[in-house]
Image (tube, rainbow, N blue to C red):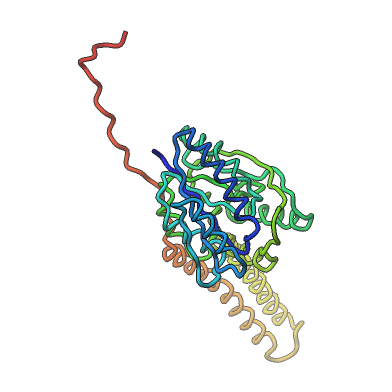
Amino acid sequence: MPTLSIVVPVYYNQDSLIPLADELARVEQELAERKMGLQLIFVNDASGDASLDRLREIQRRRPGTVVINHLANRGSMAAIKSGFAHVTGDCFTFLAADLQDPPGLLPEMVDAWLAGSRFVVRTRASREDPPLTKFFAWLNYRIVRALVLKDFPVGGFDMAIMDRVFLPHMLRCGHNKNLSLFAWSLGVPPKLLTYHREQRPFGKSRWTFRKKVNYFIDSTVGFSVKPMRLMTLLGFGLAFVCFLYVAFIIVAKALGIIPVPGYATIVSLVGFFQGCGFIMMGVLGEYVWRIYTEINQSPEAIAEVVEPAAPADKSAGPPP
């Protein structure tokens, strides 16, 4: 029987965990109707509240639930990757513990996976968030589309069911990576579904503005060479301006416009070497990016072995 594995990172979610477990129990019933099993993996990221006690209670109520406890806080991406290491399902996903992404949407996504889609994504068509949060989310995804992946969903996504073929690549994903962006960057054609992101019903978000900024930097710098290319182009542009200025100084000195002795020589040398410095920094940056991509072990392709089809039964005779 195929199985869906769900990884839930937990950080100060003591109030939402029991309602989340109830929602997931209903999802499990719907999956059973589809002859699908469910593996639940909760990862407590060193929460300072009663989250771990709630997880132990869930584990008592549902034997077989995997509970992992981080001894130090390392962030949601690290928690999700800890959960990925315990995935045994044929497909898998990660789910926020705050119920803003409704678990009830998962059965429809499983239907798409059963129909043959290897990558099923729920994009946000709308969201219940404060105006400032909406604005920064809008700005973030526009910049991501401009600098990283031009076809990334405008509203972003946190819900995605991935075939098990994704798992080894997700486990090797570099440090502090945006896992949604990484999964999209692998290039597998997604099946897109939409949903409305609900308002947080329990507790207070620990997703601070500082964490969002760091997450944005990790997303843009970690996935795209474009920011470095822009710096390289800026360096060449400044070098060109420096060389023009050097030419102007030389001509001005020859025409006697600059009477101060030594001024033309000093400015020419400074401008020339400054321009060369900008060019060399840009070239050096290109090599640093290539070293980064090699160390990061990003896959060149996701592939699977195609088994040969079973031979036709010749004794059955020709089709009617």
- What's the residue at 43%, 43% (across, down)? 3
Residue at 68% x, 47% y is 197
The answer to whether 245 appears left or right of 148 in the picture is: right
Q: Position of residue 25 (x, y in %)?
A: 55, 44
Circle count:
0
Q: Residue at x 74, y 90 (%)?
A: 260
Position of residue 266 measured from the top left corner of the image (x, y, whole percent)? 65, 87
State the residue in front, 283 or 28. 28
Q: In this view, does 310 lie above or below 94?
A: above
Residue 86 visible? The answer is yes
Q: In which quarter of the image is the C terminus?
A: top left
Image quadrant occupied by the N terminus: top left
Which quarter of the figure has residue 140? Answer: bottom right
Residue 241 appears at what percent x and percent y? Answer: 67, 70
Q: Residue at x 71, y 82 (%)?
A: 253
The residue positioned farthest toward the bottom in the image shown: 261
